[in-house]
Every structure is written in structure tokens, then in C-alpha cells.
Amino acid sequence: MNKRKMVQGLSTLAVLFAIALVATSVQAQDDTHDGEASGYHFEAAKLGAGIALGLCGVGTGLSQGPIGAAAVGMIAEDSSKFVTGLIFTALPETIVLFGFLALFLL
């Protein structure tokens, strides 16, 4: 992987991370009328959790492509490294689990 693609990938990841942080920290102003809350805060929290889960899925998809290609090449050269390739291919899926955790905590 050349240096330019690596920097481009890291900057894309940083932008997606920043969007996820902003989306999950959306706060509504307390808009009360006679003691009733508007409910906007809860809707914004659900929207932020959905965006965070979607971005986790996108990040996982972007990372599994090159990892899968490298794992197939590694297994083609030495078939005894199948388990190692499988573990490295499954590791990015834990990112989506963190997205599900954020979704279910709200």
C-alpha cells in the first residue's frame, strides 16, 4: 500500500469518526411548554445511534476488503495459515458490535 492511499484512508476514517461523534452528541435545547418536554432530544439520540451504527458498518466494509484479499493471498501461499486468515478477516466485525452496543444503550 502506498503512502498516499494510507493517508487518504486514515483521513477518511478520521472524518467518519468525527461525524459519528457529532451525531451521537447531538443535544436539543430544552424546549418546555408548561412542564412538557418536546421529545426532540430522544429523537436526536435515536438518529445519532443510527448514524453511528451505519458508519460502523461502512468502516467494517472498507476494512474487510483489503484484509480479505490479503488473507486469501496468505492462504494461497501457505494453506496451514487458514485459521490466522480467518481471525484477521473476522476482527473488523467487532467494530459493528460496538455500533450495536451504542444503539441498544440508547
Image (cartoon, grey):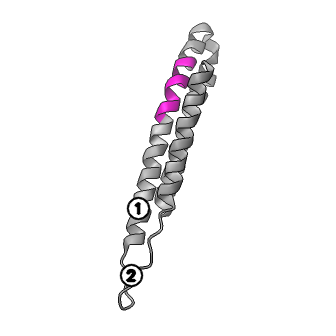
> In which quadrant of the rendered image does the N terminus lie?
top right
Secondary structure at badge 2 equals loop
Is residue 33 visible from the viewing direction of this image?
yes
- Where is residue 22? Give x, y as percent: 50, 56
Residue 82 highlighted magenta (yes or no):
no
Residue 38: which numbered mark, if any?
none
- Going 42% across and 46% down the picture, which residue do you hit? 54
- Where is residue 11? Give x, y as percent: 56, 36
- Residue position marked by numbered label 2 in the rendering: 37
Residue 46: which numbered mark, if any?
1
The vertical placement of 68 against 33, above or below, is above
Is residue 92 visible from the viewing direction of this image?
no
Q: Cα distance, mark 2 to mark 1?
A: 16 Å
- Where is residue 58? Give x, y as percent: 45, 38
The single residue placed furthest to the top in the displayed view is 77
The vertical placement of 58 against 103, above or below, is above
Q: In the image, what residue type sits under mark 1?
A: Lys
Q: Main secondary structure of the magenta part?
A: helix
Q: Nearer the viewer, mark 2 or mark 1?
A: 2
- Going 49% across and 58% down the picture, which residue do you hit? 24
Q: How crowded is mark 2: few (under 14 residues within 10 Å), some or many (20 or more)?
A: few
Q: In the image, what residue type sits under mark 2?
A: Ala
Nearer to the camera, 81 or 91: 91
Instruction: Answer with mark 2 or mark 1, whichever residue precedes in sequence.
Output: 2
Nearer to the camera, 18 or 51: 18
The vertical placement of 20 against 71, above or below, is below
Whether tag 2 and tag 1 are in contact, CB under 8 A, the answer is no
- Going 56% across and 9% down the picture, which residue do you hit? 76
The single residue placed furthest to the bottom in the displayed view is 34
Secondary structure at badge 1 equals helix
Please give the range of residues in magenta.
Answer: 61-70
- Where is residue 10? Give x, y as percent: 59, 34
